[in-house]
Amino acid sequence: MTIDTSGNWWIGTEPEDIKSFLDAYTAEEYPSDEFRLAKCKCGSIAFVLEADDEEGAAIRKCVSCKEEHFICDSEEYWADSNPETCSCFECGSKETNVGVGFSLYDDRRAVRWLYIGVRCNNCGILGCFAGWKVGYEPSLQLMDNV
């Protein structure tokens, strides 16, 4: 895992670099305490991602098998969402790795906030495409549904 931070954007060489990016990105607000990398049932880690920050909903579509998977509890909010498709602002690619950072309350009994991080599969640029407040209990099960 090597991240190049010398230019305008952080560029990762591995999907796991999303975690390091989110750790730095969230350090000033609600720090990411836990991280999960998205992986399809078919084994692929390449997706097209759609999300709506305001509604708190996201879905990933596997590039290999085309299966769709709602991230965390997004299915509950999807009908009211107006999602945008993630595309790299540098190269325009829509193919990305997806990882979710979870900020937990101090007692670690619930998720406070979640961040959907991405890594462009074409050029490696790292970013945070969406994030929203969770703030209900129980919510730790969200970490098992990335």
Image (spheres, rainbow, N blue to C red):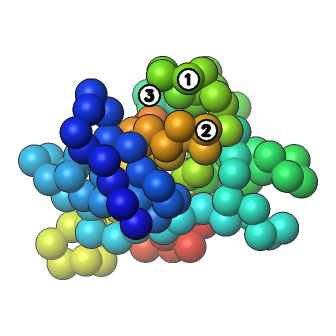
Residue 136 appears anywhere in the view: no
Q: Residue at x 80, y 46 (%)?
A: 63
Residue 124 appears anywhere in the view: yes
**What residue is pinned by disc 2?**
122
Q: Residue at x 26, y 32 (%)?
A: 7
Determine the CA span between mark 3 and mark 2: 28 Å
Task: Point out the frontmost of discs 3 and 2.
Answer: 2
Q: Residues within 10 Å of mark 3 (few under 14, many from 20)?
A: few
Residue 103 appears in which quarter of the rendering?
bottom left
Q: Which amino acid type is marked by label 3?
A: Glu
34 or 75: nearer the viewer: 34
Please tell me how many numbered marks the rendered image carries. 3
Q: Residues within 10 Å of mark 1 (few under 14, many from 20)?
A: few
Image coords of residue 73 (percent x, y):
58, 54
Q: Measured along the vertical axis of the image, is residue 99 above or below residue 122?
A: below
Image coords of residue 123 (percent x, y):
53, 37
Mark 3 or mark 2: name the one nearer the start of the chain: 3
Q: Which amino acid type is marked by label 2?
A: Asn
**What residue is pinned by disc 1?**
91
Q: Which amino acid type is marked by label 1?
A: Cys
Q: Residue at x 21, y 67 (%)?
A: 105
The residue tagged with tag 2: helix, strand or loop? Answer: loop
Mark 2 or mark 1: name the one nearer the start of the chain: 1
Q: Are marks 2 and 1 in contact (CB under 8 Å)?
A: yes
Q: Measured along the vertical axis of the image, is residue 115 above or below residue 109?
A: above
- In the image, is 143 to the left or to the right of 104? right
75 or 86: nearer the viewer: 86
